[in-house]
Image: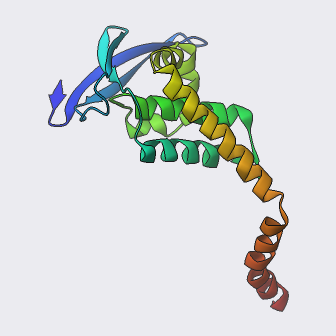
Amino acid sequence: MSCSYGRIVPITFIDAPFQIIIEIKIIIKDKTKRGTNNLEVEFKGELFNIYEYLSTQDEYDLINIALQKAEMGGIYNPALLDAFFCLNIVYLFTDLEIPTEMREDELALFDLLEREGFIDFIVSNINNEEYMNIYNNLIETKTAKEQYKNSTAAIIQSLIEDLPKNAEAAAK
């Protein structure tokens, strides 16, 4: 099947605990190339591209989305950080577009892609230097955000931001 912006292909995964066959209809987009040496790969009989590198904006988005989704009560959950980082690697480094309905439960999607070896396949085909650069930037950003949250400046800013809400609640 094809459409004006790409071709839709099914990739079949087996959900092991229930032996249910899950077919994800993935759209392989006709994007402009991000590098001159994009890699055409095959997974379960379907060809798609893995980009040579990410733009600065995509790298920024990947890091911030992973951190935002992994934050729980002011700390970063390592399991969630890994899941959202890996999913965004798949979303941004390939010309695959996973439909919105499949993204509604991203942790289940991550589990499925991880179990089937898809995430490892993508990561193993990304330029290692590019991947490590993004991963290191993720860790540095996480550390800087954690340090800031524990700083006096963050505490003062929090007090200033919370003051109007607290005053309003006290007035009631």
**Residue 84: image location, x then y, percent:** 58, 36
Image quarter of the C terminus: bottom right
Could you tell me how many numbered marks the image carries? 0
Frontmost residue, 94 versus 53? 53
> Looking at the rendering, which quadrant does residue 165 occupy?
bottom right
Rendered location of residue 95, percent (x, y)? 32, 29
Is residue 109 in sight in this rendering?
A: no
Q: Is residue 80 left or right of residue 150?
A: left
Query: Is residue 145 rendered to the left or right of residue 28?
Result: right
Q: Horizontal and vertical percent for residue 9?
A: 28, 21
Residue at 71% x, 52% y is: 145
- Residue 1 in the figure: left or right of residue 22: left
* Residue 7 visible somewhere in the drawing: yes
Name the residue located 80 percent from the left edge and 87 percent from the top edge.
167
Query: What colour scheme was applied to this rendering of the protein?
Result: rainbow
Q: Quadrant of the N terminus?
A: top left
Task: Name the quadrant containing residue 152.
Answer: bottom right
Q: Quadrant of residue 98?
A: top left
* Identity of the residue drawn at 41% across and 31% down: 53
Residue 106, image x, y percentages:
54, 35
